[in-house]
Amino acid sequence: MKRLHTAAAVAATSVLGAGAAVAAGRYAAGTALRPSRHHRGRSHVPAGFEGPALTVHATDPGHITLTRSLTSLLPGTYGLAGRHGHAVVGPVVEGPDGQGAAADTVVRALLRTGPGELGPGDRVRLTPQVYSGDPVGALGLASAEADVPGELGTLPAWFVPGGRRTWVIAVHGLGATREQALCVLPFLAERRVPVLVLGYRGDAGAPRPADGVGHLGNTEWRDLDAAIRYAMRYGAERVVLHGWSTGASMALQAAANSALRDRVAGLVLDSPVLDWRATVRALASARHVPKPLLPLVLRAAQGRAGLGTERLATAAEPRRLAVPTLLFHGPADSVAPWQASRDFAAAREDLVTLHTVNGAPHAAMWNADPEKYEEALRRFLTPLV
């Protein structure tokens, strides 16, 4: 396989010319690694949900009718984000009149609307970010804005207080925002667990990386390290790191490299990026990098974003794991290969509990079955907090 990729890269270089190939490769790598909100004018498109937008065909009390597609048929609970409003949708159901939807549409339960309103003709995207806003506005949870001193500058965070001395630090993933963590906050609040929801470099309100691209956790983990220091300064005795996608990779890096790694009580990894090559290829394809440039992407990503370094590889090395870990992942993830998580869990059965979720796209493991996700989380956290 490596020989085929090399041959393809040579062929692309021959067609483009060496100089043009280098420039094209850097462009392609930048497109793959750039935060999604800066990609093609789209706003906050989480990785794995970058397909065509859906059209709202009708709304009725408790129901919404959408364009039929593989995305709109996904089982579970999701957000619907559009220019004019936001909604929360549940399972696919029959229409409000008891009849099935038309062949080109699908009817889902409409669980919640707002902020704004959605109506016929609106273009929307299904997203694993179920709620929109902050913990107070979206969930009615008491919280405060926190300023975390980071390596590049001040990092924005939400702090939801609780009575325990072990905190959860939540870190979102590719193309998402802090809102990704809102789905688990009610569960944690019921258990009086303090939560720090971190925004890191490249996020709105946070410093931008100098090169303008994400590094799949390879540099971003230092922002999580800063959040651990912040938690210790303000009363935490230990922390559990809960990350989605690249946030999960950041958690692994911090648990392996932080000077405060002895304060990390456990890890919750949702759809972790353990094979950076497969993820870069998937992102490049999803973001419409021209096929002739795909062979150049990995090589350019190594140079531009420092991927392929020993630190990135060793953080995902099971032998370096030292704390209990709950890993949520499933075979439908097209961005971060599930097999890598299976191998990781199998190598450390003494520390890793793998919770397999079927039918869930990347970083949407909670969405596919919230009750089972939270029950697994309850069992894992109970002895740690």
Image (cartoon, rainbow, N blue to C red):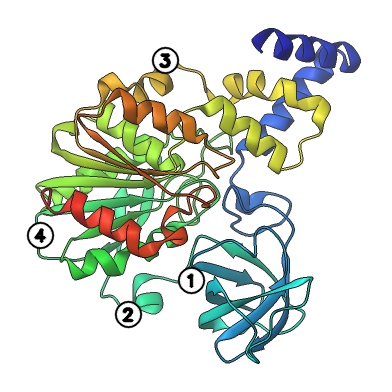
Estimate how packed mark 4 is, as few (under 14), some (14 to 19) or many (20 or more) residues with alpha carbons within 10 Å.
Answer: some
Residue 315, how many percent across, how many down?
A: 35, 25
Q: Which residue is mark 1?
A: 132
Give me the C-alpha separation between circle 2 and circle 1: 12 Å
Q: Amino acid at mark 1?
A: Ser
* Residue at the front extreme, as displayed: 99
- The answer to whether 147 appears left or right of 297 in the picture is left
- The answer to whether 275 appears left or right of 63 in the picture is left
Q: Which residue is mark 2?
A: 140
**What residue is shown at x 45% (from left), y 51% (from top)?**
206
What element does badge 1 sit on?
A: loop
Residue 310: mark: 3
Give me the C-alpha separation between circle 3 and circle 1: 38 Å
Mark 2 and mark 1 in contact? Answer it, CB < 8 Å.
no
| Mark positioned earlier in the residue sequence (2 or 4) | 2
**What residue is shown at x 31% (from left), y 23% (from top)?**
347
Q: Amino acid at mark 3?
A: Glu
